[in-house]
Amino acid sequence: TFTEKTINKIKNNLLILSIKIMQVTPYNSDQSKKTQVEDMFDNIAPKYDLLNHVLSMKIDVLWRNTLVKWMNKDAPKLVLDVATGTGDLAITVQKGTGAQVVGLDLSQQMLNVGIDKISKINLSDKIEMIKGDAENLSFEDNKFDAVSVAFGVRNFENLEKGLVELRRVVKENASVYILEFSKVEGFLAPFYMFYFKNILPQIGKLVSKDNRAYTYLPDSVNAFPYGEKMKNILENVGFKKVEYKKLSLGIATIYKATK
């Protein structure tokens, strides 16, 4: 007979397998998801900040602040911000915690925007921006006091591999903080999904000139696990404690996964 532990492990493995099978890519081409994601963000980098704030009505600022308030309880001195993009979360982390921050991203064009932004607010000595792959981090084990990712794990080519890497580089008993889109529940769900799947992509296409980037966003969110499913995946890759907070009726969720 199967033990409950064995059954749960089988369920988790099947969930991870289903994620790999349902993998959504930006351009549906023969290139790897990683290459497509890099190309997509290179393409939209000049308009990314404008679109991000307009399409979210700046509620994304509140979400990042909530993550940093949670992180600040750990009093981190060195933080890695993965999928840092143009550096919005890296800047919020630095200002909110006083930590040294390393921002890492696949897209050099996004990093270039971030480097310029960080220079203008005189934080270049506090925030280092580097090009790198979240699934193959160049850092040694147990290096960082905290790791953050905002809207990035959804774009990992191999979710499990990326999460294992985040766990590897954070110190024992320290935490990885993940901010990611989830799904609105309740009576507002159909209204939000209509905006998310129909209006948002049209605005994105018009401003960014990339016909696929903002269609990929709702497609990837729809296919990605959230809530208890995401918690189970984080526990399955070795985190000993996972907590999460739903934000704005479930539009986004913050996960705190402790090593």
Image: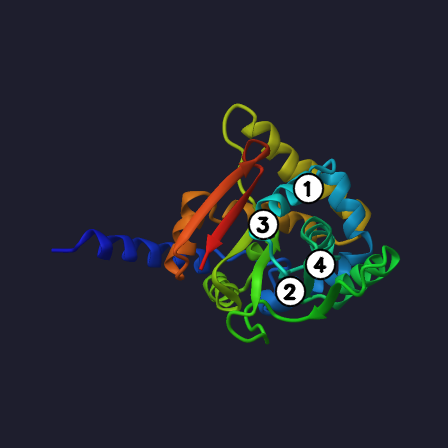
Q: Secondary structure at mark 2?
A: helix
Badge 4, how many Cα within 10 Å: few under 14, some, many 20+?
A: many
**Where does the image place residue 220, in percent across and percent down from the top left?**
56, 50
Q: Of tags 3 and 4, which is closer to the observer? A: 3
| In the foreground, 190 or 29 | 190
Q: CA distance from mark 2 to mark 4?
A: 15 Å
> Which residue is label 3 attached to?
71
**Where does the image place residue 27, in percent across and percent down from the top left?**
64, 59
Residue 60, numbered circle? 1
Identity, as a three-letter code, of the amino acid under mark 1: Asp
Q: Earlier in the sequence, mark 4 or mark 1?
A: 1
Q: CA distance from mark 2 to mark 1?
A: 24 Å
Q: CA distance from mark 2 to mark 3?
A: 31 Å
Identity, as a three-letter code, of the amino acid under mark 3: Met
Q: Quadrant of residue 182?
A: top right
Q: CA distance from mark 4 to mark 1?
A: 14 Å
> Which residue is label 2 attached to?
36
Q: Quadrant of residue 106?
A: bottom right
**Where does the image place residue 192, in percent across and percent down from the top left?**
61, 31
Residue 85, numbered circle? 4
Q: Is residue 120 visible?
A: yes
Q: Of tags 1 and 3, which is closer to the observer? A: 3
